[in-house]
Image (cartoon, grey):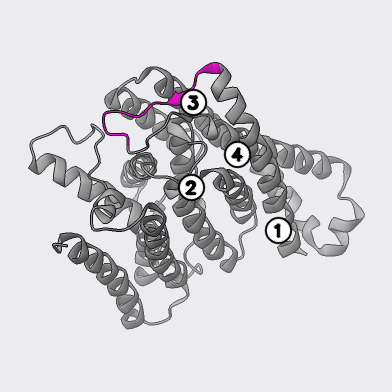
């Protein structure tokens, strides 16, 4: 029954997002919210930009609807189908987490708003980075979204803020080709879902179902050739939510030995290996060329593959496969019993990234 409930949440989010994205196209044209070709833009025609709003509104709306139902059922009693399925026992715990969920959605709302403004007026990278840091600090300090609790409060808070900002920026950077950021986010989200469900979590997998469904509905319109973009209003929210949900995911069985604690740190890093690789590599290229690392260009992982002769679709599908290869290994890492096997899985991810780097550096 839990599986069917998750599929229902995913399916509902998918349908609403698909319809909302269709509406967003028309609204974008009326409001002149269009991504115009030029500068570092790779597309040839002006394209609607409010796809991020369709993702955000679907994700937020379905989330709030679910939280409202949980709170009501926790007070009035679970309906019969929840009692018979065994899901009713999870209602009190889910209701207790509602304030935390609202705080997280508040952070997403701020990022969506700053993204919308940037899509319209181009605020510049440093102001966006400042807002990301402030939002990350708020959800870490006041909402309790943290990693590495065992390293003490100072280290935990610092690492959590850095992680949320890094992943938020990575998906903002990754949104540089049709279908790329949404597809990679879907794959990473599914891997996170598998890791969380494998550890018996309910709250995080349920939320990931809503996020993945929202992304898939948007991806119907965004896969190459895209008819709408998510813009910063979408990429900032998607990266932020994946970062937050990866912090809330349990990666250990509870024995809390040194090896399992290390798995808990490595698993999310490996899961997001491809977005992090793209961000790190493009920033290093910009620094080596003595340019501002925060100013956009066409030197991203996707652009470099395309320059090797790949079509846009093949480039996107190649990155999907790379993401799936690293994400599957990461989701299985917490279930590995021996250190040797874990080392081999980490090495596999590193080798995949090294193969990518070698292929990128090879002359055509």
- Residue that numbered label 1 is attached to: 7
Vertical side of 250 occupied by 243: above or below: above
Reply yes or no: does residue 224 show up in magenta. Answer: no
- Which numbered dot is residue 101? 4
Name the element at disc 1.
helix
Query: Is residue 207 left or right of 275 when viewed as pictured?
Result: right
Labelled pair 1, 3 in contact (Cβ < 8 Å) = no
- N-terminal of the pair, mark 2 or mark 1, is 1
| Image coordinates for residue 256, horizontal then vertical, percent | 43, 67
Outermost residue toward the right in this view: 80
Pair 1/3: label in front: 1
Which SS type dominates the magenta stretch? loop
- Residue that numbered label 3 is attached to: 110
- N-terminal of the pair, mark 2 or mark 4, is 4
The residue carrying pointer 1 sits among few (fewer than 14), some (14 to 19) or many (20 or more) residues within 10 Å by Cα, namely: some
| Quadrant the C terminus occupies | bottom left
The residue carrying pointer 2 sits among few (fewer than 14), some (14 to 19) or many (20 or more) residues within 10 Å by Cα, namely: many
How far is the residue under mark 2 from the one under mark 1? 19 Å
- Residue that numbered label 2 is attached to: 182
Name the element at disc 2.
helix
How far is the residue under mark 4 from the one under mark 3? 14 Å
- N-terminal of the pair, mark 1 or mark 4, is 1
The one of 294 and 219 positioned closer to us in this rendering: 219
Labelled pair 2, 1 in contact (Cβ < 8 Å) = no
In magenta, the rendered stretch is 31-41
Name the element at disc 4.
helix
- N-terminal of the pair, mark 2 or mark 3, is 3
| Image coordinates for residue 52, horizontal then vertical, percent | 52, 34
Name the element at disc 3.
helix
């Amino acid at each position: 029954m839990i599986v069917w409930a998750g599929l229902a949440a995913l399916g509902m989010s998918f349908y609403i997002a698909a319809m909302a994205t269709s509406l967003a196209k028309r609204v974008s044209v009326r409001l002149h919210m269009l991504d115009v070709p030029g500068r570092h833009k790779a597309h040839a025609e002006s394209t609607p930009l409010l796809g991020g709003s369709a993702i955000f509104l679907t994700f937020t709306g379905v989330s709030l609807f679910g939280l409202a139902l949980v709170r009501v059922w926790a007070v009035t009693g679970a309906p019969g189908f929840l009692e018979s399925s065994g899901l009713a026992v999870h209602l009190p715990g889910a209701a207790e987490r509602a304030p935390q969920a609202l705080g997280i959605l508040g952070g997403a709302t701020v990022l969506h708003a700053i993204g919308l403004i940037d899509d319209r007026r181009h605020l510049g990278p440093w102001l966006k980075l400042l807002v990301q840091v402030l939002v990350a600090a708020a959800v870490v300090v006041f909402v309790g979204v943290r990693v590495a609790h065992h390293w003490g409060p100072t280290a935990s808070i610092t690492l959590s803020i850095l992680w949320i900002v890094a992943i938020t920026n990575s998906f903002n950077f990754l949104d540089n080709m049709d279908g790329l950021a949404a597809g990679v986010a879907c794959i990473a989200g599914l891997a996170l879902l598998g890791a969380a469900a494998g550890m018996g979590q309910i709250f995080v997998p349920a939320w990931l179902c809503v996020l993945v469904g929202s992304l898939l509905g948007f991806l119907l319109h965004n896969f190459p050739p895209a008819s709408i973009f998510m813009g910063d209003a979408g990429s900032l929210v998607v990266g932020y939510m994946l970062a937050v949900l990866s912090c809330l995911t349990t990666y250990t069985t509870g024995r809390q030995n040194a090896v399992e604690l290390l798995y808990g740190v490595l698993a999310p890093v490996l899961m997001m290996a491809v977005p992090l690789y793209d961000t790190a590599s493009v920033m290093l290229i910009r620094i080596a060329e003595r340019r501002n690392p925060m100013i956009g260009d066409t030197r991203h992982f996707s652009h470099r593959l395309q320059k090797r002769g790949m079509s846009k679709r093949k480039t996107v599908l190649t990155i999907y496969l790379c993401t799936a290869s690293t994400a599957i290994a990461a989701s299985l890492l917490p279930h590995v019993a021996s250190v040797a096997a874990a080392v081999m899985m980490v090495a596999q991810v590193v080798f995949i990234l090294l193969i990518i780097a070698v292929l990128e550096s090879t002359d055509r």
